[in-house]
Amino acid sequence: MNISDLDIFSPDERQHLLNNLDKTNIRYPLDETIVSLFAKQVDKTPDSVALKFGEKILTYLELDVESGRVAALLIQKGVKNEEVIGLFVDPSIEAIIGMLAIQKAGCAYLPMDIDYPPERIRYTIQDSGIRIVLCSAQQSSTVNDQCETLCFEDVDDEAEPSSVTIKPSDLCYVIYTSGSTGNPKGVMIEHRNVVRLFFNDAFQFDFGPRDVWMLFHSHCFDFSVWEIYGALLFGAKLVIVPKLTARDPIAFEHVDAKINLSPPDACGGLAYRLSISFGFPSRMVPFSNAGVNFLR
């Protein structure tokens, strides 16, 4: 007998895996994009706080205007539909502005951490074939020998983006893997993938304007998508955690207590530590990969 002939599942297990867990036919809005959903949220809650980073705050309307101005700069440079644009920034308000701006211009953002080793930055730019990187003037010299750079400081405060047609099937971002099993690989995600994640008939959460989210994970890591759009597509506040604070468990615990997160998304180990320190006053706790034993 060959190993392939062995059946390791009981009939009930097979039924559960093949049918009960099959969500391929789930319904979601087929004509929406991240850009269209964000625009609807701006119309609903223009004066609500969208972003907070340190003492700086941006409302939904201000975020819409700021990202529109950056989008206008990209369009002026002649970017093409679904072109991949590098985003070379630290976790910051500019990072979120850049993501929305690149998508408003009909393109897809590729985030790169400014602390990446030079070899990884060079590899990512070459492998992805990006020709334009959006960054600050301070970081421009790091990549301007490899591609064209556009700086946030060059944005025209009076500029408004021209109309761009964005389809649900268009690319919205590319995130590179860690490369732990070889060279990093770019994962290409379309608008409809993110729309389906948050707006579907089987969605298990009731996210809304009363929530306070935290951008804790790196914006170059795919879990940040959950944090960013779980806030901005539902009218919630997104608190951006400084990179050094996110690496310091003690400092981070005080941030979490101060802002009183509604859905404090976290990995298992961090979630357990916060539960011990503060008892998780939040109304819901979406976890990533690892399980949490709160009884240990």
Image (tube, rainbow, N blue to C red):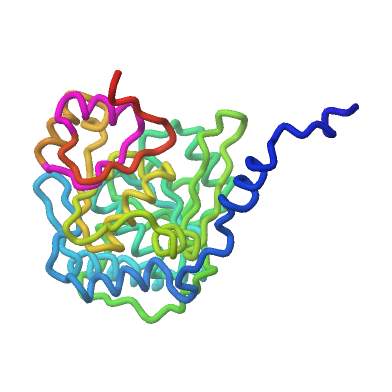
Q: Quadrant of the C terminus?
A: top left
* 247 up-or-down from 17: above or below: above
Q: Nearer the viewer, residue 271 or 53?
A: 271
* Residue reaching furthest to the bottom: 163
What percent of the width, then of the height, locates residue 140? 35, 47
Residue at image position (19%, 59%) is 50
- Report the magenta residues as a range: 259-279
What percent of the width, then of the height, locates residue 206? 29, 58
Is residue 8 left or right of 149 when viewed as pictured? Answer: right
* 258 up-or-down from 94: above or below: above
* Picture quadrant where residue 203 is located: bottom left
Residue at image position (58%, 42%) is 185
Q: Is residue 278 magenta?
A: yes
Residue at image position (25%, 58%) is 153
* Picture quadrant where residue 66 is located: bottom left
What percent of the width, then of the height, locates residue 158? 21, 75
Is residue 41 left or right of 123 when viewed as pictured? Answer: left
* Residue reaching furthest to the top: 296
Is residue 148 left or right of 213 when viewed as pictured? Answer: right
* Picture quadrant where residue 3 is located: top right
Q: Is residue 266 magenta?
A: yes
Q: Nearer the viewer, residue 21 or 242?
A: 21
